[in-house]
């Protein structure tokens, strides 16, 4: 099977002739820092060789637990936030029927996501939907105290026990959490839930290929062995001994940093396949949380084309020239639809009669790329043969490896997120959480000025 391919031709033309090649020694040093564990955040490098370390026995254990949930649940709620849900949702949404939520075909459980917001209406409506459903829960939290997830899990645990009884609840609630510590671990041990471990050395946004992502994806009915296989093949394709210009993650990291050095401060991830919307969301967290530090970092934005050409297209074409695009292009769709002929031809589209809809989409993609490049927007293109588990695994690892390299090039700690704690401290102070008395007094004094 061929790999995904990166083309930087229409980005490098905006740079000096030797700009990308000049990054080769820097990229080599960045990769060596990852491999040798000498970079900042080196206690969170467990993702680096994760795909090649996953055994068939472990895949089997995940699939067996997934089967228990599949056999006993109409609905499974994945409770988690950030990296604890975005990776799973990326794969599930990419591979599911676009109208899965309407099909009700009973082949696979409906997968819902909770614990990623504090929306009271959202939670109320979800609980109402679950009121007559046989449902289970995958609770994903390293600590068990993340507010959004803990709040949702408390509601779901009670409702599951009330509706299905404590014995069945023990069977259909699964914990993905720390090996030894934290509220979620304590609850899982006390209640006797089946549990899987979030490795200490893998941060949330790099955790798709741990049980955090693999278990929900398996419950949804997809082939996690193929997902891992794709990632493992991309691990080989981006290894430190692969020549620089043949290593797609290395070239991507170099190109985006070269563009950043030339004043391109915003990267827009583009897709022409609606199923990839949550890949955009996962990618935004991966790069935003990894690189946005020390007053540095490319701002990660994303659009779904052609839809957003009718909203953001104007700004991309003619706005401030501080942007570049990375386009994910799916070469072959999974279905075939031919454009019909119409005798009256009132819309003037008979010139498309007999063509595949995807051909129209590809010409929209090419035409947009040409227009944006002409408008001063550098473009990279990631070509993906087909949208399936194997190639999603490749995409995930490609971006993870490039992120590790890119963060080292930027000179930040790619694997921490100190800025995320600021809002939490203020929120806890405003809610009068025990232990936050001084902070509460100080913040209320600010508000009363």
Image: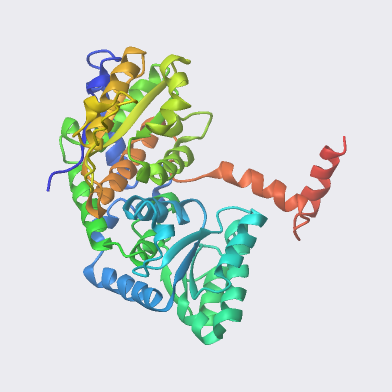
170 up-or-down from 431: above or below: below
Q: Viewed as shown, does residue 76 lie left or right of 257? A: right
248 up-or-down from 349: above or below: below
Scheme by which the image is coloured = rainbow
Q: Viewed as shown, does residue 303 lie left or right of 444? A: left
Q: Quadrant of residue 19?
A: top left
- Work out which residue is located at the far left of the displayed protein and give it: 1
Q: Quadrant of residue 118?
A: bottom right
- Work out which residue is located at the far right of the displayed protein and give it: 449
| Place of residue 422 in the rendered image (x, y in percent of width and height, measured from the top left) | 64, 43
Q: Quadrant of residue 96?
A: bottom left
308 up-or-down from 113: above or below: above
Q: Residue at x 48, y 27 (%)?
A: 311
Q: Residue at x 44, y 14 (%)?
A: 318
Q: Viewed as shown, does residue 443 lie left or right of 186? A: right
Please indicate, yes or no, whether residue 11 appears anywhere in the rendered image: no
| Place of residue 254 in the rendered image (x, y in percent of width and height, measured from the top left) | 30, 28
Please indicate, yes or no, whether residue 428 appears anywhere in the rendered image: yes
Q: Residue at x 24, y 72 (%)?
A: 57
The C terminus - image quarter: top right
Q: Nearer the viewer, residue 280 or 427?
A: 280
264 up-or-down from 73: above or below: above
Q: Nearer the viewer, residue 389 or 363?
A: 363
Q: Residue at x 41, y 54 (%)?
A: 89
- Work out which residue is located at the far front of the displayed protein and give it: 344
| Place of residue 355 in the rendered image (x, y in percent of width and height, measured from the top left) | 19, 33
- Work out which residue is located at the far bottom of the displayed protein and give it: 167
């Amino acid at each position: 099977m061929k790999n995904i391919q990166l083309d930087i031709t229409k980005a490098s033309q905006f740079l000096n002739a030797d700009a990308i090649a000049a990054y080769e020694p820097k990229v080599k040093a960045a990769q060596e820092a990852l491999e040798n564990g000498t970079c900042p955040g080196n206690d969170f490098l467990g993702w680096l060789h994760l795909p090649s370390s996953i055994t068939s026995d472990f895949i089997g254990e995940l699939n067996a637990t997934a089967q228990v949930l599949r056999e006993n649940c109409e609905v499974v709620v994945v409770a988690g936030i950030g990296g604890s849900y975005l990776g799973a949702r990326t794969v599930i949404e990419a591979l599911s029927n676009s109208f899965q939520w309407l099909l009700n075909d009973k082949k696979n459980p409906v997968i819902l996501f909770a614990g990623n917001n504090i929306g009271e209406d959202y939670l109320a409506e979800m609980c109402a939907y679950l009121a007559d459903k046989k449902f289970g829960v995958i609770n994903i939290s390293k600590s068990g105290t993340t507010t959004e997830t803990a709040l949702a899990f408390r509601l779901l645990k009670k409702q599951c026990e009330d509706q299905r009884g404590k014995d069945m609840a023990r069977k259909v609630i699964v914990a993905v959490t720390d090996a030894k510590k934290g509220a979620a671990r304590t609850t899982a041990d006390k209640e006797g839930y089946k549990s899987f471990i979030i490795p200490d050395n893998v941060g949330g946004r790099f955790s798709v290929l741990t049980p955090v992502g693999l278990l929900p994806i398996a419950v949804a009915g997809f082939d996690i062995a193929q997902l891992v296989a794709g990632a493992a093949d991309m691990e080989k394709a981006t290894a430190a001994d692969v020549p620089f210009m043949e290593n797609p993650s290395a070239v991507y990291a170099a190109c985006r940093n070269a563009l950043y050095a030339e004043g391109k401060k915003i990267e827009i991830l583009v897709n022409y396949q609606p199923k990839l919307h949550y890949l955009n969301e996962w990618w935004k967290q991966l790069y935003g949380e990894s690189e946005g530090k020390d007053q540095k970092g490319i701002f990660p934005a994303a659009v779904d084309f052609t839809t957003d050409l009718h909203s953001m297209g104007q700004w991309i074409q003619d706005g401030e020239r501080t942007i570049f695009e990375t386009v994910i292009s799916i070469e072959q769709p999974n279905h075939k639809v031919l454009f019909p002929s119409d005798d009256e031809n009132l819309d003037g589209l008979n010139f498309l009669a007999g063509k595949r809809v995807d051909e129209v989409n590809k010409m929209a993609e090419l035409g947009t790329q040409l227009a944006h490049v002409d408008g001063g927007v550098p473009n990279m293109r990631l070509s993906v043969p087909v949208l399936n588990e194997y190639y999603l695994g490749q995409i995930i690892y490609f971006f993870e490896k490039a992120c590790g390299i890119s963060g080292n090039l930027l000179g930040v700690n790619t694997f921490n997120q100190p800025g995320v704690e600021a809002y939490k401290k203020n929120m806890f102070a405003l809610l009068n959480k025990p232990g936050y008395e001084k902070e509460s007094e100080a913040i209320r004094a600010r508000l009363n000025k």
